[in-house]
Image (spheres, rainbow, N blue to C red):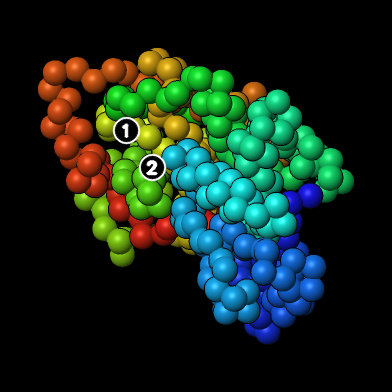
């Protein structure tokens, strides 16, 4: 009862972002009036939308956390958010917190579930708290959130249970895509895929599949202005291997994009994960665990992606330094950022 989940408080121009964000937005003046009427002097707004607005409407009592492109807050930030909410609620028994992202759904629900568990509700079980949030919103967890958000709620549960993420970096050797999604046509099924890896909302590494025909992608000769040559993968390929050999640690966002016939880039799927919870070996992400792929008939039911991790060995230190510096060996640099997530 001390949390308010709401859509984006939009001004006259409406909410930024998708049609879903615009449909769920609330007029900012109406939101401010409601909070003043029922919680005057005792409300704080938590903005996790990536978008700013006139905070003076809320007496500048707005707490903002930004994590560009990530479906859920990075794990460390998630704990900071929960601690900030706890401090505010403990300051006065009448205090409430109004939480919003762009749509008031995925990010908002994941944060509320973690905050409730952090405060001791539902036996400190974030997964049960997420089910409660979905029930209160007359929805189910799968429609309300996406796989990466549910993954981070599970990470949060692991930490509360005493299982902290490993702090040491790992070497991501390669990624393997099993079965070929159809982003082409009936006459030419298949796709032209490449993988991107983001750290802190910034592109850190890009790679295409082994055997792809585009040397600009495969050998790091691409640039921001270049549209890569087609590296088409048809159903007969069966599976694709993407060489990586990049040192990774902490929160990582993996995105797969398709280059269509016009040269436009289309997001195929993505996954946010924490390397500290990844195994030394194979991390398999099934179709239902991938944002964008789940529920998309262009992916076979048995589609999955394997991420192959290995411990760092002597000689990997240079690679670790290159990764920290943002180097992109064998990389085609794509100027496109990561999409905001409601």
Query: Which residue is more in the foreground, 341 or 332?
Result: 341
Q: In this image, 43 relative to 178: left or right? A: right
- In the picture of the structure, the residue carrying the numbered disc 1 is 248
Residue at position x 48%, y 34% in the image: 273
Q: Which secondary structure lies at badge 2? A: strand
Of callouts 2 and 1, the N-terminal one: 2
Residue 249 seen in the current view: yes
Residue found at x 56% / y 66%:
62
> In the visual, does 55 lie left or right of 279?
right
Residue situated in front as seen by the camera: 113 or 263: 113
Rendering coords of residue 9 (x, y %): 67, 71
Give the residue furthest to the top. 281
The reply to whether callout 2 and callout 1 are in contact (CB within 8 Å) is yes
Q: Residue furthest right?
A: 138
Above or below, 20 relative to 287:
below
Residue positioned 72% across, 57% down in the render: 94
Give the structural element (helix, strand or loop) at label 1. strand
Image disc number at residue 125:
none
Residue 104 appears in the rendering: no
Q: Quadrant of the C terminus?
A: bottom right
Q: Which residue is mark 2?
A: 197
The quadrant where residue 303 appears: top right
Count the marks: 2
* Circle 1 crowding by C-alpha within 10 Å: few under 14, some 14–19, many from 20: many
Image height check: is 302 above or below 63? Answer: above
Percent position of residue 30, x then y: 77, 77
Q: Which image quadrant is residue 309 in? A: top left
Give how far across and how far down residue 64 sits, in percent: 51, 61
Mark 2 or 1, closer to the camera: 1
């Amino acid at each position: 009862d001390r949390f308010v989940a709401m859509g984006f408080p939009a001004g006259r121009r409406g909410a930024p972002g998708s049609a879903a964000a615009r449909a769920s937005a609330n007029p900012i003046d109406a939101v401010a009036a409601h909070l003043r009427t029922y919680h005057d002097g005792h409300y704080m707004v938590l903005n996790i939308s990536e978008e700013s607005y006139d905070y003076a409407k809320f007496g500048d009592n707005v707490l903002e956390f930004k994590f560009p492109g990530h479906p859920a807050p990075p794990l460390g930030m998630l704990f900071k958010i929960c601690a900030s909410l706890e401090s505010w609620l403990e300051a006065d028994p009448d205090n409430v917190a109004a939480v919003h992202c762009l749509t008031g759904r995925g990010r908002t629900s994941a944060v509320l579930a973690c905050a409730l568990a952090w405060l001791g509700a539902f036996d400190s079980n974030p997964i049960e708290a997420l089910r409660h949030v979905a029930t209160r919103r007359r929805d189910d967890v799968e429609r309300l959130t996406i796989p990466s958000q549910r993954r981070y709620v599970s990470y949060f549960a692991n930490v509360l249970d005493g299982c902290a993420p490993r702090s040491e970096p790992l070497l991501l050797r390669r990624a393997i895509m099993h079965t070929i999604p159809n982003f082409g046509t009936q006459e030419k099924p298949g796709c032209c895929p490449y993988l991107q890896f983001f750290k802190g909302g910034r592109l850190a590494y890009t790679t295409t599949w082994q055997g792809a025909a585009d040397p600009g992608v495969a050998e790091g000769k691409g640039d921001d202005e270049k549209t890569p040559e087609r590296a088409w993968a048809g159903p007969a390929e069966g599976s694709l291997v993407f060489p990586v050999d990049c040192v990774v640690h902490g929160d990582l966002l993996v995105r797969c994009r398709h280059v269509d016939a016009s040269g436009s880039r289309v997001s195929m799927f993505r996954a946010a994960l924490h390397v500290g919870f990844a195994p030394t070996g194979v991390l398999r992400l099934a179709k239902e665990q991938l944002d964008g792929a789940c529920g998309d008939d262009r992916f076979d039911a048995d589609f999955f992606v394997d991420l192959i991790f290995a411990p760092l060995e002597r000689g990997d230190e240079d690679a670790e330094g290159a990764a920290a510096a943002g180097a992109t060996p064998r990389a085609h640099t794509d100027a496109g950022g990561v999409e905001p997530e409601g």
